[in-house]
Image (cartoon, rainbow, N blue to C red):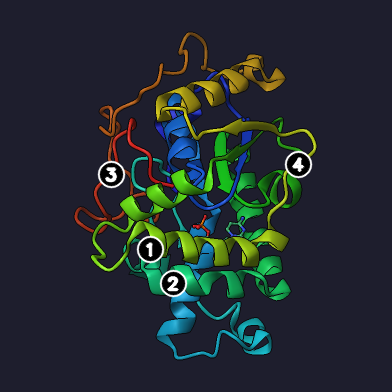
Amino acid sequence: MTNHPATEASDHARLVIAVDGPAGSGKSTAARGAARALGFRYLDTGSTYRALTWWLLAHGADISDPDVVAACARRPVIEVGTDPEAPAIRVDGTDVAGPIRTREVSNAVSAVASVPEVRRHLVAMQQGIIADAIAAGAGIVAEGRDIGTAVAPDAPVKVFLTASETVRARRRTAELATDPTATVEQTRAEQARRDRSDAPQMAKAADAVEIDTTALGLDEVIREIVALAQAAPQAHQGSAGSRGRPPQTPPDSAGSGGRPPQTSPDSAAPGQNPPLRKAGAWST
Ligand code: DC
């Protein structure tokens, strides 16, 4: 991992924020926006399940067979970056940030994510990334389905995002805007199927703060997460050289804020990542 100048300087250093919720609840956009606002690292755990699924499909593996999936779980080298400005994801050195968002992968990933060997492997990897951030004196926002219960059960800040089914389908359809065949109705049906398959993997921690994002703007949700971070005990511990830099007030724009460029895998070479979304627009 590379250096994260803004992160290491944060007053909220070493804070882990767990953001969980179903597809379309807004967790990715909100978690990433909160990481930017706080100067934290950002971990999209769903991208690791998607990356493995992409690899399995690319190799013609029968993903309906849990034994096949389990046997392949450790074969690809999956690298996930933690820069919220450019959350890179690579499989065996290939940038798969775009390919892992296709409907084909979206409709196959639940089956892969339900295989225990896959979860053991990827949860351990995610815990390693969080541990690296903490060891470096950084804060990190990790988002997924089981962060508050399995990946980082000791996280001092836990958020569980929800949204109505219709709003979730609308956000998902907008995300798939490049796929002309994806209608809201289709997306809603696919989403219902995925919800059923994802249900066993998703858990709301007893101590998580639930936020219904149906009628909220992205900036309001980011503000709530930032406020929870500021209220956490760790927020006041700080770290050497961290004084006097309050977190930025959201909305934080998609610009890099003058950060020096970072190297792989935290930010890929120019042109390798999809364009950043600005805070203020929901996706997932
Ligand atoms: O959040 P997402 O849609 O990118 O997640 C992709 C898949 O991975 C989805 O089927 C749920 C699963 N997932 C999981 O089981 N545990 C996580 N921590 C994150 C995602």
Secondary element under disc 1, as helix, strand or loop, is helix
Q: CA distance from mark 1 to mark 4?
A: 27 Å
The numbered dot on residue 205 is 4
Q: Amino acid at mark 1?
A: Arg
Q: Amino acid at mark 2?
A: Val
Residue for badge 1: 101
Asked if labels 2 and 1 touch by Cβ distance under 8 angstroms, the answer is yes
Give whichever of 255, 284 is nearer the camera: 284
Secondary element under disc 3, as helix, strand or loop, is loop
Residue for badge 3: 276
Q: CA distance from mark 4 to mark 3?
A: 30 Å
Q: Nearer the viewer, mark 4 or mark 3?
A: 4
Apparent side of residue 277 relative to residue 46 in the rendered image (left or right): left
Q: Upstream in the sequence, badge 4 or badge 3?
A: 4
Task: State the residue lying farthest toward the left.
Answer: 271
Ligand 1 - quadrant of the structure image: bottom right
Task: From the top left corner, tell me how far across and down residue 197 is, in percent.
Answer: 63, 67
Secondary element under disc 2, as helix, strand or loop, is helix
The numbered dot on residue 116 is none
Q: Can the viewer see residue 99?
A: yes
Give whichever of 262, 202 is nearer the camera: 202
Asked if labels 3 and 1 touch by Cβ distance under 8 angstroms, the answer is no
Q: Can the viewer see residue 92?
A: no
Secondary element under disc 4, as helix, strand or loop, is loop
Report the residue at 46% width, 27% height from top.
216
Task: From the top left corner, tell me how far across and down residue 146 is, in percent.
Answer: 68, 51
Q: Upstream in the sequence, badge 1 or badge 4?
A: 1
Residue for badge 2: 105
Q: Amino acid at mark 3?
A: Leu
* Figure quadrant of residue 260: top left
